[in-house]
Amino acid sequence: MKGLLDFALISSDKKLIASIEGFCHKSNYMLISWNNESAFLDAQEAEAIEAKFIMVSDLDSTTKDSLAQKVQVASQMCPNSFICCVVGQKMPKEEASFVIKSGADVMMTIDEVTTTSKLEYICNNVIRSDYIPIKTSDLEQDKELTFNVYYYVGQRNKFLICGHDGLVLSADKFEKMKKLGEFYIKRSDVDKFNTYVKTLSYNSETAVERRCRSEYLSLCWSYTEFIILLTDYSRFNSFTEGKALLDKCKTFSNRLISSMAAVNDLWKIINQRVINISSLDNIPAVTAYAGLFALQMEIENVEDVMLAALLSDISLIFQPPETIIKLKTTGVEKLSAEEQARYKEHPVNSLKIALDRKVPINNNIREILLCTHERADGNGFPKKRLSDKIPYEAYIVQFAEEYHKNSMLKEGTTSINLQEYNKILMDSPDTMSRYKPTFVNNIKKLFT
Ligand SMILES: [Fe+2]
C-alpha cells in the first residue's frame, strides 16, 4: 500500500525545515521530512512513499555531483513526483543544468524559497491543481468516459469520484451528475480529456462551448509550464529555447482565439468557483477575456494582446508572500510605501524576466505589457503615462482583469447577474477616469 504525501522534504538545514513546516502547515499540505537521502531510502523500504512534490536541498554544496546524486535518488524512488532542488547560491549554468538533467524539475535558491511567492505558485499548481475543473457541458450522454470524473466536497476538502473511467453515461446517471454542477478531472488526464472532447458531437452550441473550454484548459496548463520554466534561473538562455516557449503559448492562444470566435458567452466557459488561488492563477482567464474583447473590437493583432496579458504579471512570483496576500485581500492601497514601490515595478520586471530568458517579444507586446497598469487620468504606474502614450490594447488587458476579478463566482454562490454587474462596472467613476472615453464607449457596445 503506497502512502501518498503532498510534500516530502529531504534536508538537514534547520532554517529550511522550519520554513517548509510553516509553509505546509499554512497551506494544509501533508509533509514528512528526512535529514538525508539514506533516511529517505530507509523509509521507502519500510513503506513505499509517493509524494507529489519532493524538495531536496544541499545548501553548502559547491559541486554539482552531491546534489545530482540526491536528485537521482529522489527521482528513481518517485518517478512521478515533481522534484525541486534548493541550493544556497545560484550555481554556474552548466552545473545547474547537470542537476536538472539528473531529474530535477526546478531549481531554487534558499532566498527564493523563503522570501518570494515562487514556492507557493509551484505547489499550488503541482499539489493543489492536481484537479482541473470541467463543466457538465464537457460531457455527453451515452458516451463512454475515458478518464475519472470527480466532484469537490467543500466541507471535507476532498475530491470524490462520481464517474469512473470506462463508464457509459446513461441518461439517468448524467441527470444525477448534472445536479452536482461542477466536476473535476486529474491534470494527468488532460490529454485523454481533449481527445474525448474531439470525439463528441459537433453541431450544437454546447459542442462549440466544450471545444473552447478544452482549448482554454490547454492554455492554462501551458502557461503554468511556461512560468515555471521562465522563472527558473538554471534553465535555458538561448534564443531557440525562448522562441520555442513563446511559440507554444502562441499556438494555444491562437487555438483559443479560433474557438472563442464561435462562442456566445465566454464567461460560462472560463468562470469556475475558485478553490485555491495564488498570485498568478488569474492570468489564463484574464488572457482569454482580453483575447475575446480584442477580437470583438476588431483589434488587428489579437495574439499580441493575449501574449502581453500572459506575460505582464510573471514577476509577481518574486514578490514576498505577504504582499500577495495583502494584494488579494485588501488591495494595492493597503500595501506599505515600500511594498507599493516594489509592486508598481512589476510590469517592468516581468518584461526583464522575459528578455533575460531570450523570449522574442515584439515592440507592440512590450508597449502593451508596460502599460497594463497605466491610466488615462495619468495616475497609473509605473510611469504615470498620459492617455495619448498608452496603447489602446493595454486598456483591453486592464479591463479584462477587472472584469475577471469582479465576476468570479464567490464561495457559496452559484450565479451572478452579469448584466447588472456590467452596468455598474462600466458606469463607475473609476472606469471613466481609468480608460479613454472611446474605449469605454466601445466596451459598452460589446455588452449591449
Ligand atoms: Fe499586473
Image (cartoon, rainbow, N blue to C red):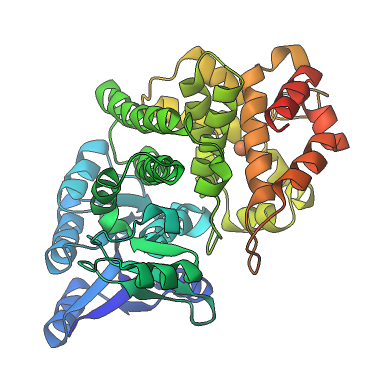
Classify 371 as above or below 300. below
Left or right, 284 with respect to 203, comes to: right
Viewport quadrant of the C terminus: top right
Q: Position of residue 116 (x, y in %)?
A: 51, 53
Left or right, 365 with respect to 372, comes to: left
User: What residue lies at 60% left-to-right and 36% top-to-bottom?
Assistant: 346
User: What residue lies at 36% left-to-right and 24% top-to-bottom?
Assistant: 358
Q: Position of residue 222 (x, y in %)?
A: 35, 41
The answer to which of 285 and 108 lies nearer the viewer is 285
Displayed-image quarter of ligand 1? top right
Name the image quarter holding residue 436: top right
The answer to which of 357 and 181 lies nearer the viewer is 181
Classify 83 as above or below 95. below
User: What residue lies at 88% left-to-right and 35% top-to-bottom?
Assistant: 429
Q: Position of residue 190 (x, y in %)?
A: 29, 52
Evaluate whether residue 336 shows in this view.
Answer: yes
Left or right, 139 with respect to 408, comes to: left
Total tally of numbered discs in the picture: 0
Q: Position of residue 437 (x, y in %)?
A: 81, 20
Evaluate whether residue 12 shows in this view.
Answer: no
Left or right, 150 with respect to 339, comes to: left
User: What residue lies at 71% left-to-right and 13% top-to-bottom?
Assistant: 389
Residue that extends furthest to the right in the rendered view of this protein? 429
Viewport quadrant of the N terminus: bottom left
